[in-house]
Amino acid sequence: MSRLLLQSAWVFLLPALLQTPALAFPFVPEQPMISVEKLRSGMKGHLLTVLRGTKPVRLPVEIVDVLPQRGAVRNHILFRLLSSLENGGVRLSQGMSGSPLYVGGKLAGAVSAGWDFSDHTLALATPIEEMCGVFSRPDRPMDLGRGKKVLELSLPLSAGGVSHQAAAGLGARLGVPVETTPYGASGELPLSGSQLAPGEAVSVLLAWGDVEMSSAGTVTATSKDGRFLAFGHSFLGRGAVNFPAARARVHETVLSRVFPHKIASPVSLAGTVTQDRTAGVGGRMGYFTPSIAASFVFRDADVSGTPVVRNFRVVPDAYLGVKLLEGIYEGLFDDQWDRKGQGTAAVTLRVEGRGLEQGWTRTNVFFSDSDLSGSALTESSAIIARVLTQAYREVFPIGFKLDVTVSQEPKMLFIEDVLVSQDASPGDALCVQVSLRPWRREPIQRSFEVVVPKDATGVCELVVRGGGTNSLGQIALDGGWKAIDGFDRLLTELDAADANNELIVELFHDQVDNKGRKDGKKNVAELLPEEKEFLSETKARRIKEGTLRVLRSEYVVDGMMKRLINLGEDGAEK
């Protein structure tokens, strides 16, 4: 079974916003080429690749044969690495992907694949004419947030700055193996002062900063217009992309029976990969894409409460960015929490971006008896997905800040009792006293005033509950009476959702329904107010009229209690 020759590296960069033409132009290598039709068994040549440091070296090879293929790449070149005094025990390894193959001093192709547990002197190369076709389709320059269709990922990746468990979680979300590395972030990368050259090591990045995901290969060819080809195979197969590329340094080439590999890390920012196709990746030198900024702030209230801050960026791909952010945030949470079992987390998600001058913030509190990170980050992950993939308007550039404070203590309030007058008249203000018990502590009392509507009749129902119990829903949206029609409305309704740390007091009274109609249908006049309103509007109306009261706390409020209120003669029979 073939294994693509990839090796990871870890980087941090500060993107700059430039534009590049979107039209497709033929790629013409600066290096003279030889076509695959002219290759014959036994022809001698050499590879150009970095074994250590940054300077490429020549490795002698011999052409074994040309293998016809069915698919996007029509041929592969089968070749063998020859022994010499210079290369000694060197074998073909991960990280050599894209290493240019020269025959008779002319560029024939690029190393693309080899085999596990096999003869590591034998490998495949993608013909250079196939790789030049990478640029046959137009680039997609950064368009400030436009999303792209999700495609299946097919290549292994490596991650630094997170644990093995977190990397496995990322792999599950992305659908590829993700390996961890003992060496991590290298800090901010300087801009490269020179152009990439064939044979040099290059890293392609998905996430960078205090957490990084990337793969490294080799530059195959360059053109006079500032473009480059690399890898000899796809990275993720996502077509037109905007993935940062950096010149890399190879620390060592490690021999292995499974598969030899290079240990590499970036040294300077070189440009952007704009095409990710079957025959290789292609990009532009000196073009630096913007990105999605993210930060994670973690506090352990049981220790010192001192914040631990992690800053990173991910590629400007809305759908891929959702998976990356979800996995990285959960991985960082697990790494910092470093335990299993019960716990409480106060979570604040802040979103900033174009058109959000004041930013947008959502705070909630979560408790779990087993998987705190999974429970605590579910809401934030859903919000990030809604924001990044929303269809209403561009908000790029955009950034997310996730602030989490945790404690092993079950920070919970349990509703124990509700006291309220059993009789009232329409228009009366009722005093409601709620008894709340913190976990294994004495109860505390909270008082509220709710108003009986003047048009109420019969019996009113008083409900006291935690925000996570029987939460108010978007009745108008769920029933098909309304639809979200803009980004601002989306944020407003996301913020209107009940939170677990809210104590909610509601008064309900008889309302018009369709039970008495023979045809079972409603007319417009019979629609409930909630069926004509967004949730935010319903809450605002009911708070104003006095039938809804909300108290925010630092605890998860658990439970629900009900009381019936008999209305006096002003409204109905007693």
Image: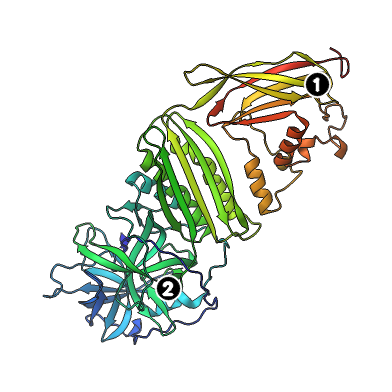
Q: Three-letter amino acid code at disc 2?
A: Gly
Q: CA distance from mark 1 to mark 2?
A: 73 Å
* Percent coordinates x, y for residue 297 in the rendering: 44, 45
Q: Which residue is mark 1?
A: 428
Residue 97 is at least partly visible in this image: no
N-terminal label among 1 and 2: 2
Q: Is residue 197 above or below residue 210?
A: below
- Element type at marker 1? loop
Q: Is residue 173 above or below residue 144?
A: above
* Percent coordinates x, y for residue 313 in the rendering: 45, 57
Residue 521 is at least partly visible in this image: yes
- Element type at marker 2? strand
Mark 1 crowd level (few <14, some 14–19, many ≥20, 10 Å Cα): some
Q: Is residue 353 above or below residue 88?
A: above
Numbered circle sitting on residue 315? none
Q: Could you tell me which quadrant the N terminus lies in?
A: bottom left
Q: Which residue is mark 2?
A: 282
Among the 4 quarters of the image, the one containing residue 424: top right
- What's the residue at 52%, 35% (across, down)? 365
Q: Three-letter amino acid code at disc 1?
A: Asp
* Percent coordinates x, y for residue 257 in the rendering: 19, 57
* Percent coordinates x, y for residue 13 in the rendering: 40, 64
| Near-viewer residue (564 or 478) | 564
Q: Could you tell me which quadrant the C terminus lies in?
A: top right
| Near-viewer residue (102 or 554) | 554
